[in-house]
Image (cartoon, coloured by chain):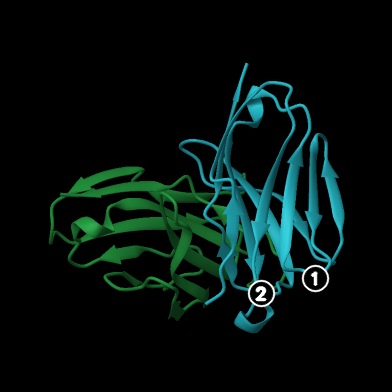
Amino acid sequence: TQLLEQSPQFLSIQEGENLTVYCNSSSVFSSLQWYRQEPGEGPVLLVTVVTGGEVKKLKRLTFQFGDARKDSSLHITAAQPGDTGLYLCAGQNPNQGGKLIFGQGTELSVKP
Amino acid sequence: EAQVTQNPRYLITVTGKKLTVTCSQNMNHEYMSWYRQDPGLGLRQIYYSMNVEVTDKGDVPEGYKVSRKEKRNFPLILESPSPNQTSLYFCASSQRQVFNTEAFFGQGTRLTVV
């Protein structure tokens, strides 16, 4: 069974601080997606990374896919209260028809 | 507006009383799936459907049924709910189950079984 381990599970920081969320596995994924979920809503896709070593930026968010395509990270610069939410990584498995496998999620709280 | 609609949003029921959670998408997506979300466990797939009349088990299918009679609808059926099925449920759809495809999620159904 493929697993994606996210860390940390909970993160509470002050506005303006930087943070990194990690998503690790012992398995190779064809691509990795990051979703953000706000209270009372479903997850919404932020980004998809597909190439080992790939880096994508979305304003203050930087996403990286590991060289071996087994891990990924999300870095937020100068966090704002609007960044508060649950961040989920999801890997796609080439041997399972592209099925999405989700990490446990990271609950981020940014205090003003 | 492209969306996945689930109903109801909240449901409290008693053990053993059959219930159905509806899911409808307006994007003409082929692939649909149901997930449950529990604290510390992330999203776990219950069932999925690759097209009309094609459904298959996900990782946690016990106690659930689904059907896909039309492309847009994918209801989740709990024939005899039990307290361990208390959870937050999400329906999702995507164009096809291929790589790099974005999954669109409904707003969720919070189910409590007492």
Decide which of A101, A8 is in the foreground and name it: A8
Identify the secondary structure beneath mark 2: loop
Quarter of the image where the C terminus of chain A is located:
top right
Task: Give the image location of residue A14, x and y in percent.
Answer: 65, 22
Location of mark 2 (residue): A27
Residue B94 relative to residue B6: left or right: right
Task: Give the image location of residue B40, x and y in percent.
Answer: 44, 51
Mark 1 chain = A
Q: Quadrant of residue B55?
A: bottom left
Task: Give the image location of residue A37, x and y in percent.
Answer: 56, 42
Q: Colour of chain B?
A: green
The three-letter code of the residue at mark 2 reads Ser
Kindly report the distance in space between the C-alpha atoms of the residues bearing marks 2 and 1: 9 Å
Decide which of B99, B54 is in the foreground and name it: B99
- Mark 2 nearby-residue class (10 Å; few <14, some 14–19, many ≥20): some
Mark 2 chain = A
Q: Quadrant of residue A13?
A: top right
Q: Residue at x 80, y 34 (%)?
A: A60
Q: Are marks 2 and 1 on the same chain?
A: yes
- Number of numbered discs on residues: 2
Going from N to C along the chain, the mark reached first, 2 or 1, is: 2
Q: Which chain is cyan?
A: A
Location of mark 1 (residue): A68
Decide which of A73, B26 is in the foreground and name it: A73
Q: Residue at x 57, y 70 (%)?
A: B31
Identify the secondary structure beneath mark 1: loop
